[in-house]
Amino acid sequence: MSIPVSIKELIDWSNGEDATNSELASWLNLLGFKDRKGLTKFLNTPLVRDKSMARQILRSWSGRKLLDEVSDLILMDEDSSGESVLDTLEKLLNEKDEVTTFDLLNSLSVKAIHIDLDGWIEVANNWRSELKKQQKLISDLVSTNEVSSLIEESNLSGPEIKETEYEFISLSVPHRNEPLELEIWNPSFRKKTRKNWIMLMPGLGGDRSHFNWLARSLSHNGWPVVVLAHPGSDSIALEALVRGRLPLSGAEVIPDRINDLDSVLQAKELGLIDISEEKVVLMGHSLGALTAILASGAKIDDQLDDRCQKVLDNLSLTNLSSLLQCQLVDINLPDRKSMKNLSAIVGMNSFGSFLWQKNLDNQINIPLFLTGGTFDLVTPSISEQLGLLLTLSSSPLSRVLLIEGASHFSPIRVEGQMNQSEGKDLFNLSESIVGYHPLSVQSLLAFQIISFLEKLEDKKSIPSKTNLTKGKLKFHILDKAIIEKLVKFQ
């Protein structure tokens, strides 16, 4: 069912110029606008606050894809492409610093909008279903027969490790106009002889400094660590987006990120990086984790386009990573063989569950340690970390660490976070987005990642167990058998 709404009548009604018992008023009440005051507030809320950044987002692949999907649900007369909205919004952005919904509707060269009520109901049901799955996952974990276990090995917010320093080097690479900037964290002393070294990659818009806490902990425990910065999709690119100088980066940066990774491996082989260990563990946050998985040789199957048609039709904002995954339909990734000397992949808030079908042909025997949080709506744990392990890994050593109350941004440490809850950074996010105390989450992540790496070197698995607590944090370590039971009944 499609509801035609006259733009003039909509604006007139919000200004009190139409009878309260009009047909439009009845429709508006059904759609959730109970009075003129609420509608007026909605229409006058800034749709765009920063015109420079908004323009760059609208011109990006992800921005256009979202606009296309919304245009299928709200039609402008006969325009189902969203072009009239985009053109009008671009014009308003040239004239105003802030653009409201009222400004946009009043400037459109159409007389009516047509709301696909059936479509919006389907979208709402999909959102509700996804959120219920997340809630049920937690209740299922809590209701297992395992009694809550208390982990006491270390103080979650203990003192910072200070003694390990890193070396900064610039690495010239043929695929970029600017050098790669690397931090080399070599342990100042070795508690044990390690078999692996670690390559650590930030996510989209991330900075090397966001993960110094983890590199320091790993090197303090004997592992050499190389932390990359990826030009074009790092914190500098994010700042350029905020200032309206560069478009929003997406999955198009993955080929260059994989080339960055290969360049570091080659530099290490040539002796340009002073690390003696031969075997490598790839570690990353978000897009950095996906880069590691794709670099390992995991091949995307030819059914991705079909799956993405269904995913994008749902307009599901409960899994924003679906946009990046589906963008890979239009990106040519080079065929890769299995990576030499790859021991494992550690992915914090990893994603990629749409990229592979659930069959043994796609699975890799590399141990995966995937971490996530129940407060993550960017890469939700049930569809991404849990789904990704089931889809991709055939190794019995693979595990998922699920932390209750942690979000997509919990692993990111920013300047001043030790003394302030939010810190100072472009990633200066409130607790409502970051989730439960990020320093506690980071300490738990470091502890569990180190536990995984310790066992890995002896070719052993860390125990899987639900209902664990450490300090005030509740968390679960899940193997494939537990995950299959959890996902089966979702």
Image (cartoon, rainbow, N blue to C red):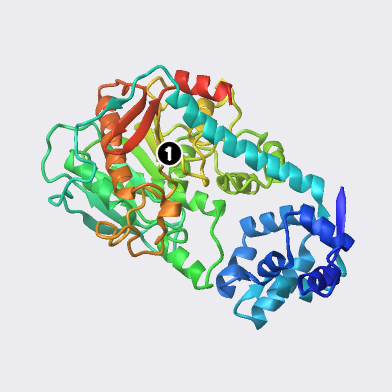
**131 and 160: which one is in front?**
131
Give the left or right position of residue 418, taking residue 240 as reference. left
Residue on which disc 1 sits = 372
Q: Residue at x 22, y 49 (%)?
A: 185
Q: Position of residue 130 (x, y in %)?
A: 60, 37
Give the left or right position of residue 228, taking residue 91 as reference. left
For residue 489, say whether it is visible: yes
Which residue is situated farthest in the bottom direction here?
95
**167 and 85: which one is in front?**
85
Q: Residue at x 56, y 73 (%)?
A: 50
Q: Indicate the quadrant where residue 8 lies.
A: bottom right
**Tally of marks:** 1
Mark 1 is surrounded, within 10 Å at the Cα level, by few (under 14), some (14 to 19) or many (20 or more) other residues, namely many
Determine whether the residue tagged by mark 1 lies in a helix, strand or loop.
strand
Q: Position of residue 262 (x, y in %)?
A: 40, 45
Q: Residue at x 57, y 33 (%)?
A: 133
**129 and 266: which one is in front?**
129
Task: Please tell me whether residue 347 is drawn above or below residue 176 in the rendered image.
Answer: above
Give the left or right position of residue 186, taking residue 47 as reference. left
Q: Position of residue 149 (x, y in %)?
A: 29, 25
From the image, which quarter does the C terminus lie in? top right
Task: Please tell me whether residue 144 is drawn above or below residue 183 in the rendered image.
Answer: above
Task: Please tell me whether residue 248 is drawn above or below residue 436 in the rendered image.
Answer: below
Q: Position of residue 211 (x, y in %)?
A: 31, 51
Q: Residue at x 77, y 65 (%)?
A: 83
Q: Indicate the quadrant where residue 426 lies.
A: bottom left
Q: Amino acid at mark 1?
A: Gly
For residue 271, say whether it is visible: no
Give the left or right position of residue 396, taking residue 53 as reference. left
